[in-house]
Image (cartoon, coloured by chain):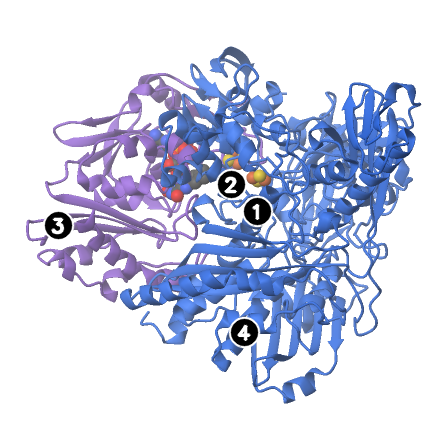
Chain colours: A purple, B blue
Amino acid sequence: MSAYVRPDNLEEALEFLSEQPRILLSGGTDFFPARVGKPIKENVLDITGITSLRSIEMTSEYIKIGALTTWSDIVQSKLPPAFNGLKKAAITIGGIQTQNAATICGNICNASPAADSVPNLMALDARVKLQSLNESRILNLEDFLIGNRKTLRKPNELVSEILIPHPKESSYGNFEKLGARAYLVISIVMVGAVVELDKKQTVLNLKIAVGSCSPVAKRLKLLEKEAVGQKIKTIRIEPKHIDSLKPIDDIRATANYRAKIIPELLKRVIKGVVKL
Amino acid sequence: MSIIENTSISFVLNNIPQRLSVNPLSRFSDILRDHLGLTGTKVGCDAGDCGACTIQINGEQRYACLTATGQLEGCDVRTVEGLSTNGSISSLQKAFLEEGAAQCGICTPGMLMAAQSLLDKNPNPKKQQILDALGGVLCRCTGYTKIVQAVIKAGKGLSNKQIDNSISSVGTRMEKVDGIKKIKGKEIFGADVSPKNSLWLKAIRSPHFRAKFSHDDPDIILQRFPGIKKILTEKDITGNNGFGIYPDIKDQPVLAKGHVRYRGEAVVALVGEKETVESLNDEDLGLKWEPLEAIRGWDAALSGKFEPVQSEIPDNILAEGYLKKNDVKKGFEESFKTAEGHWITSAVEHGYIEPEAGYAEKVGQRLNIFVCTQTPYMDQAEIAQVLGINANQIRIIPSAVGGGFGGKLDLSLQPLIALAAWILDRPVRCIYSRPESLASTTKRHPVRAFAKAGCNSEGKLTAFEYHGDFNTGAYASWGPTVADRVPIHCTGPYFVPNVLSKTRALLTNESPSGAFRGFGTPQAAIAHEALMDILAEKMGMDPLDFRINNAIRKGDKTNTGQLLEYSVGQVECLESLKNSWIEWRKKSLLYNTKNRTLKQGVGCGCVWYGCGNTAMSNPSTMRVGINHNGKITLYNGAVDIGQGANTIMIQICAESLGLPATQFEFVMSDTDLTADAGKTSASRQTFVSGKAAQLAGENLRAQIIHLAEASENAFLRIEENKLIVKDDSGEHSLILSDILPKSNGDVLIGEGTFDPPTTPLDENRQGDPYATYGFGAQIALVEVDTLLGTTKVIKIAAAHDVGKAINPTQVEGQIQGGIAQGLGLALMEEYIQEYSENFHDYLMPTVGDMPDIDIILIEDHEPLGPYGAKGIGEHALIPTAPAIIGAIKDATGISIHHVPATPDRVLKALHDSKLYNV
Ligand SMILES: Cc1cc2nc3c(=O)[nH]c(=O)nc-3n(C[C@@H](O)[C@@H](O)[C@H](O)COP(=O)(O)OP(=O)(O)OC[C@H]3O[C@@H](n4cnc5c(N)ncnc54)[C@H](O)[C@@H]3O)c2cc1C
Ligand code: FES
Ligand code: FES
C-alpha cells in the first residue's frame, strides 16, 4: 500500500524523506496533470502543511522565498524592482487558479525547459537551499538544474528556500514571454533579465537568461559582459550572443522560428526595463 | 480497494462544517462529485487546462482537480452550490441568466466561481481585471462576450431587478428555460448521474496509428483480477461490429478485430469496479502490439505505396464530390482577370468542455441509455444494429449536452456501455478522460485545396473552380457528407455562371474526420475569400465593393442551378458593414504610417450555407400537450446542445398556440416520449424543428378553438384545470380534468411535422439541395507584430441574415461563439496527432483572445421558416477565419496559405515575402 503524509513541520517532513523516497507534493499543478486518467499509487509527501515555508523574508544576506510561496504571493508582495521580471512572469502562469496554488519552488523542481521562473531567477542570481535530515546545502540555481526534468536534488532532500542576494540599488528586472494565446499559455520562448543602471542609463551589470530554447534555461554570458558600460538604448544583439542556444522543433513552434525571435525578445526585455 | 488509507479531513463547505474520511490524495473534484454528490463542480480535463472545476478555497479561486483533498484541512471552501443563499440566486448568477452568459452551461459553474472570487475583492472591476480573473476558464460556446458583460453588470449591481419572465414569445430575449439549472450547477450532464450499483467501463485504446494486436484470453485475466466483471472484445458483439452514420457504410468497429487503423481506436473494454478498471495496464492484459506502416497525410494516401487503410478501398478514396455548372473552361477563357492558389488547413478539435459520458441500464428486455449526444434517434438505430436487437428496445435519454459542435453526432461510448449493460444486466457507466476524448473522437477535416476564380472587365465573376482533398482519417464518419457539401458551397455567396468542383475524401491512419460546424465549408471559405481579395486587387476595386458587386441576390441561380426567390440578405449584410469597413480601413492605414513594425489591417469574409441535410428528406416532428392540471409540455425532439433549442422551440410553439412561453415545461429528446426531430446539425433545428413546433402549436390551437367553438383569433389562458378561450362572443371554458388523457397524461395534444422541400441532385449536382440558405459577412481588424509574427484580432463586425431572430440574445451568442471558434481556426487551433491529446497543447481561444464584436442582425423573412427564421449555428463560424486571414494580408501584404496562422507561419511568410526585414 502506498502512503500519503502531510506533516506540519519541516523536521518531520525531513524524517519522512529519510525513511524512503517519496514524491513531494506542493501546489499540485504539475503533479496532477502528469497523472490524468491514471490511479495514483506513489508514496507522497505533501509539504503544504508546513506553513512556515510560505514566507518571503529579508535577512542581511538574502531575500528568502520559502518553498510554499505561490505565484500569487509573488504578485502581491512588495519586492525590489529587480523582481519586476519575476512578477511579470507570475501573472502569465496559467490562470489565477494556477497562480494561487502553484509554488515557484515547485516550478524550479519540476525542471521543465519552459519553466517561467527559471530565467528570472537566474537573472536574480538565485540559489536553492536543499535540506535533508542531517544536512543542508546551498546550490546555485544554474548548477541545481541539470537537464529536462533533472535536478541535483537527492531523494532524501527537499528545497526549503530560494535564496536571492539583495539586488544592487537601481537594478531593474524585466520578462518577455511569447506564447500563442492570451492566457493559459506555455512559453515558446521567454527571456528574463535584471539590469543595473547608473543615472545616465549606462549598464553597470546585466544578467539575462533565455528559456525554452535549451533543456535548461541559459544565461547569455557574452552578452552580459559586452553590455557593461553601454547605454541601455544602444545595446545590439548579435548572433554570437545567442549561439549557445540550441532551440528545437516542437508542437509549439519550429526551431527556426525560435532562433529568429530570440534577438527580438532580448531587445524588448532590455529596452523594456527603462519603461517599467 | 482504496490504494491509500483514508484520512479524516475537516473543512467548511458552503458554510457547513464537514468531516470526511477519504483518500487524502484524491482530487477534490472527485470527492465533491462522487462522495458528496455535489456535481455542480464540473470536470473537463483533470489537468488545470479548462477551469470547469474552479471553486473557491479561502476566498481564492482554485482548480478542484489539482487540489489534493488532504490539503483542505481547516479550509473554507465554496462551490457553485454555495452561491445561492436561502434559495435565491446571487446577483452574479442573475446577471448570467439575463445576459445569456450560459449556453451549454458546462463551463458556467467554473466561470461563476472565478468571477465571484474577483467580485468578492473588487465589486466594481475594470474590464482587464475581469479578463484576468476569467483567463483560467475555457468556454467553447459563448465566445466569452456575454460572460464578461454579465460580470460587468453584476459588478455594477445592475441585475438586482426582478427577473421579468413575462415577455416571452418570438423575437424577445427570453431567458433560457433551462438557464436557472445551469447557473445553479443543477444541470445534469452525462457524467453527473448513474444508478448506484453501476459498473465502470473503460476502453483500452491503441497507442499506434496502425498495428496488429493480440491479448490474453479474457477468462484468464478475469481470474487474476476479481474487480473486473467482464472484458469486452469484438467476440462479444451480438450484432454487427460496425457503425457509421450512413445506412450502407458501417466501417468503424466498436472494438477492433486484431487490427487497428488509428491511434485511439478501442480494442477491448474493461468493465468492473472503478479502481481496478482504472489501474490495469497493457501488460496486465497481455496486450501485444505489432506496429505497421501507417498512412499519414494526403500524399501517402494517394501514393499507392502502402497497404490501403481499408482493404475494400484499394485507392483510399472513400468518396468523391462533384459539381458542374455550365462550362468553367469557357468561363476562364472569357475572363478579364483570374486568381488562383493552394491552401492547406489543419485538423481541428471540437473542444467541447464536457468529455463524452453516460450510462446504460437494462430494464426488462430494453435498454435505457443516458448519454450526451446530438442525435438520439440515430443513436437508437445504430446501437440496435450493433446489439442485434430492435430499435424500439432502446431508449435514448440525452443528458444536458456540454457542447457538441458536430463532435457528438457520431457514436462514442454508446455501443460499449450498451453492450456491457445488455450482457451483464447491470448498469454500466463510462466517462471519457480528456486524452481519450481527444484521441478517439472525430476532428475537422484537414484539407488541401486548389481554387481559381475569374472575373470580367466589370469585375463580375465569370468562373470558379475548386479541387479539394479531405483527409478523412481511418473511417467514414461524415467524410462523404463533407465531400458533398463543399462543392455546393465552394464559391461562397456569389453569383458565378460557370463552376466546377471536385473533392475527395481520403482514408488515412489518422483520427476519423467527421462533422464540425460547417461540414468542410469553413475550410473552403478561406480559399474563396482569398480569391475575392486578389481579384478585387487586380481590378483596382475595393474588396467590399467587389463582394457587393458579386453577391448572390434574389432571382439569381446558385451553383446547383437553384433559383433563389426569398430571404437572400447577402447584399444587405455587406452594405451594413460598409461604414465600419471604411472607417477601420482609414484608421489602420493611418496607424501603419506611424508604426514601423506593428501593422493593422482589415479583411472580409462571407458565408452562405444551406440549412438542413443536402438534397434529402430530413423531417422533424414536434408535439405539445396539455394535461388535466393545465400543465403545458413541449415534447421537443431537438437536442439542445447549448445553442438554445429548448428555449426557442417553446417561444415558437407558445406564439402559435397563443399561451405564454413561461407556462411551458418541456421534455428534451427522450426517444420514448418525444417524436423524431432529427439531428442537431446542419443548422437545421430552428428552421426545420422550429417550423414543426410552430405547426404543433397551431394544431393544438385549432383543436382548442374547435372544442370551445370559439373564433380563430380568440385569446387563450389557463387557470388551474380550466382552459379559458375568450373571443368576441365571450369566455368559453374547457374543463381539462373532464377530458380523457391520451398519452403521458396529456388531454390535448398538438403535433406538427415539417420536412423542408428539396429535390435530388442530378449527375452534375444540379437541383435544389436546400429549402433555404443563411447568409452573412464579417469584417475583422487585426494587428500583426511583424517582428514576432503574432496576430491580435482587435475588432470584428458581423452581419448575418437569420430570417428572423426568434431570440436575439441566443442568436448573438451563436455569432460570438462562432467567431471564437473561427478565430481559433485562423490563428491557433491545430490538432497534431499524438501530441495534442490535452488542452495544454491543443490551444483554443481564451477570454483574452477575443476581439470586441459588433453584431448586426439582418432579417430577410424566410417564408418556409417559423415566423421567417432560418439557421445561424454554422454560419457564424464560417466567415471569421477568412476575414482574419484577409486582414493579415491587408496589414502586411503577406498571404497565408496554411492555417492556423501561428506566429511561426506568419513570420516565415513575412520573411519569404522579403517585404520585411526579418
Ligand atoms: C494550467 C496550467 C498552466 C501553467 N502554466 C505555466 C506557465 O505558463 N509557465 C510555467 O512555468 N509553468 C506553468 N505551469 C506549471 C506551474 O504551475 C508549475 O510548474 C508550478 O509552479 C509548480 O508548483 P506546484 O507547487 O504546483 O508543484 P507540484 O506540482 O506540487 O510539484 C512540482 C514538482 O516539483 C516537486 N517539488 C515541489 N516542491 C518541492 C520542493 N519544495 N522541493 C523539492 N521538490 C519539490 C514535486 O515533487 C514535483 O515533481 C502551469 C500549470 C498549469 C496547471
Ligand atoms: S477539470 Fe480542473 S481544470 Fe479542467
Ligand atoms: S457555455 Fe461555456 S462551454 Fe458551453
Label 3: chain? A
Q: Distance between the residues labelled 2 and 1?
A: 9 Å
Q: Which amino acid does label 1 sit on?
A: Glu
Residue behind mark 2: B146
Q: What residue type is labelled 4?
A: Phe
Residue B699 figure quarter: top right
Q: How far apart are marks 3 and 4 (CA)?
A: 58 Å
Closest to the camera, between mark 3 and mark 4, is 4
Q: How crowded is mark 4: few (under 14 residues within 10 Å), some or many (20 or more)?
A: many
Marks 2,1: beta carbons within 8 A: yes
* Vertical order, A266 against B397 (above or below): below
Q: How many marks?
A: 4
Q: Which amino acid does label 2 sit on?
A: Lys
Residue at x 43%, y 69% (from the top left corner): B890
Q: How far apart are marks 4 and 1 (CA)?
A: 27 Å
**Marks 1 & 3 on one chain:** no
Residue B279 figure quarter: top right
